[in-house]
């Protein structure tokens, strides 16, 4: 189960004044899943307006209704081996999205898997969060014991020329559990919980957890 408070801890920082996002990368896809342009840049180099709009996109994933729209999945040991999708996500996270070859491989896998009749965008965000310690009374002590490094992906239909709408699905990797990163789990988001993009879950080949 995903703890709501864990997700709120992440989203409270997704504001222009508090964000620690380091990078944003993404691409635009046609209905057939073919790439129609991509980008990769330092998040802080965006204009104030662009930072605000992109933070809102990223925030929709962890801020969604936990264990309904946002569900956790666990990778098996076999699914974390060489050449796996898990390994690709881990490499993307570790390089801070700076490896264009990895990003292109990721976009191509999404394009081959994701099913839609609309043009859409794939946005990926990278962050490093110094998780503050908390005392027994749950008050912050400000010292940091762990840096939670993670990526958020948002897949959004286009509402205009290169203008993304609200995310239809996406994910947070690795999961943030009990105020710590869990490299063996991913939190997957679907805007329509009753009609999820099951093909996205099949891409992970991971099992749901409770």
Image (cartoon, rainbow, N blue to C red):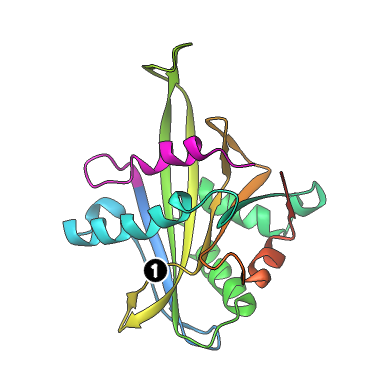
| Residue farthest toward the top in the current orientation of the protein | 136
Is-magenta flag for residue 12? yes
Q: Residue at x 49, y 69 (%)?
A: 168
Q: Viewed as shown, does residue 26 lie left or right of 93?
A: left
Q: Position of residue 22 (x, y in %)?
A: 35, 47
- The answer to which image quadrant residue 201 occupies is bottom right
Q: Position of residue 59 (x, y in %)?
A: 39, 53
| Residue farthest toward the right in the current orientation of the protein | 78
Question: Which element carries disc 1, helix, strand or loop?
Answer: loop
Q: Residue at x 58, y 72 (%)?
A: 110
- Relative to 111, say whether 132 is above or below: above
Q: Which residues are magenta?
A: 1-21
- The answer to which image quadrant residue 24 occupies is bottom left
Tell me if residue 42 can be seen. Answer: no
Q: Viewed as shown, does residue 106 lie left or right of 147?
A: right
- Please state which of residues 209 and 58 is positioned toward the viewer in this rendering: 209
């Amino acid at each position: 189960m995903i703890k709501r408070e864990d997700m709120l801890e992440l989203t409270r920082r997704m504001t222009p004044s508090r964000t620690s996002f380091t990078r944003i990368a993404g691409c635009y896809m046609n209905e057939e899943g073919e790439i129609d342009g991509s980008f990769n840049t330092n998040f802080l180099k965006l204009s104030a307006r662009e930072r605000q709009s992109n933070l809102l996109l990223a925030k929709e994933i962890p801020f969604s209704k936990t264990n309904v729209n946002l569900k956790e999945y666990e990778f098996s040991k076999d699914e974390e081996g060489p050449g796996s999708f898990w390994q690709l996500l881990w490499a993307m996270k570790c390089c801070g999205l700076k490896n264009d070859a990895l990003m292109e491989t990721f976009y191509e896998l999404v394009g081959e898997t994701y099913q839609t009749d609309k043009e859409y965008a794939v946005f990926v965000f990278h962050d490093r969060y110094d998780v503050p310690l908390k005392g027994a009374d749950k008050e912050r002590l400000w010292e940091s014991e762990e840096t939670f490094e993670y990526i958020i992906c948002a897949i959004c239909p286009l509402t205009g020329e290169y203008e993304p709408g609200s995310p239809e699905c996406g994910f947070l990797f690795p999961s943030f559990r009990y105020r710590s990163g869990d490299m063996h789990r991913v939190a997957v988001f679907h805007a329509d919980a009753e009609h999820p993009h099951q093909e996205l879950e099949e891409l992970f080949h991971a099992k749901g957890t409770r």
